[in-house]
Amino acid sequence: MLLSVWVASRTVVNGGWRTCDQLGPLMSEEMIRTCDEIRAVVGAQSRFVARVLSAPQAPIYRGFRLVGRRKDTGELVGLAEWTRSLETGEFVANADVFSACPWEHKEDQLIAA
């Protein structure tokens, strides 16, 4: 799985996203074998990114997304999104880590084709 970090753009209207200059276009490459590993790696790496982007010398971003894609197809397999709290200034996870494993989704999360 290829991991990249996208930050909320200050220049794009309506919430555009761009790659994070501080972490580069590719943050890391992870060997993943199971769906549990997707959730664990994306969760752990997103907490690491929150700490890095909270450093005093880091630019201030409204939020970020850690995106995991298959190396061979580019298909989205994992995602975590964090936003900066207006009250504390700290990053807060918006929801649980997303995994593309179909058996992990509740029925109300599935989209009918």
Image (cartoon, helix red, strand yellow):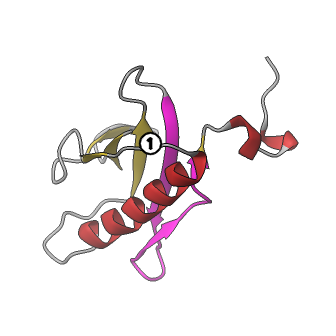
Residue drawn 52% across the image and 65% down it:
93
Q: Position of residue 27 (x, y in %)?
A: 24, 47
Q: Is residue 10 left or right of residue 32?
A: left
Q: Which residues are magenta?
A: 76-98
Where does the image place residue 63, in percent across and percent down from the top left? 40, 57
Of the pair 79 and 101, the residue shown nearer to us: 101
Residue beneath the point at 42% across and 50% down: 65
The N terminus sits in image quarter: top left
- Residue at the extreme front of the image, as rendered: 33
Name the residue furthest top.
113
Q: Residue at x 78, y 29 (%)?
A: 111
Residue located 82% across and 23% down the image: 112
In the displayed structure, would residue 98 be above or below residue 45? above
- For label 1, the residue is 15
> Going by the image, does 83 lie left or right of 29?
right
Type of amino acid under label 1: Gly
| Image vertical order of residue 52 relative to residue 25, above or below | below
The residue furthest bottom is: 88
| Picture coordinates of residue 88, whole percent (x, y) | 44, 83
Where is residue 16 drawn, in percent x and y? 39, 38
Crowd around label 1: few <14 · some 14–19 · many ≥20 (10 Å): few
Q: Residue furthest left?
A: 57
